[in-house]
Amino acid sequence: MLEMIRSKVMERIQKRVVAMSKNSGVLCVKIRKILERVVAESVGFTYIWNGKYGFEVKAHADQYTVDVMKNSCSCGAWQLCSIPCPHVITCLLHLRKSVVAIVKECYKK
C-alpha cells in the first residue's frame, strides 16, 4: 500500500517538473494568471502618496492604506497569500517597481 502511494506521488512530481520546464516565465502559470487579473482590477484606482512608501488607495467607494516596505495593505489580502492585491499594484506602478519582484520566492519557478 505505502509503495503504491510513494509511486503515485513520484509520478505526480515528475509530471509537474515536466510541466514547469515548459514554462518560460519567472512565475508559475497559475500565479501569473492571478497577477494578470489583479493588474486588470487595479485600473482606475487613485492613490495619495503619504510618505516614502506609504499610500492611501481609493478604490471606487472604499479606501485602503498600503505600506510597501512593511508588505501590508488594510484589505489584508497581501498579508494572507503574499500575492499583491490591486491596491498594492497601483502603488507599485507609481514607484516603478516590478510586480514580479515583490512576489514571494515560493511562487517563482
Image (cartoon, rainbow, N blue to C red):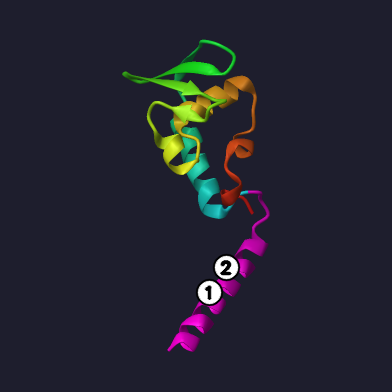
Residue at 44%, 32% in the rendered image: 41
Q: Is residue 108 above or below residue 57?
A: below
Q: Nearer the viewer, residue 106 or 18?
A: 106
Magenta segment boundaries in residue numbering: 1-26
Q: Nearer the viewer, residue 90 or 7?
A: 7
Q: Quadrant of the C terminus?
A: bottom right
Residue at 59%, 20% in the rendered image: 94
Mark-to-mark CA distance, 2 and 1: 6 Å
Residue 40: percent from left, percent from top: 48, 34
Q: Is residue 2 above or below residue 10?
A: below
Q: Quadrant of the N terminus?
A: bottom left
Q: What residue did someone put label 1 on?
A: 12
Q: Is residue 14 magenta?
A: yes
Residue 12: percent from left, percent from top: 53, 74
Please name the amino acid that badge 2 sits on: Arg
Q: Is residue 109 magenta?
A: no
Residue at 64%, 58% in the rendered image: 23
Q: What residue did someone put label 2 on?
A: 16
Q: Is label 1 in a helix, a strand or a loop?
A: helix
Whether label 2 touches label 1, CB < 8 Å:
yes
Q: Is residue 79 above or below residue 31?
A: above
Please name the amino acid that badge 1 sits on: Arg
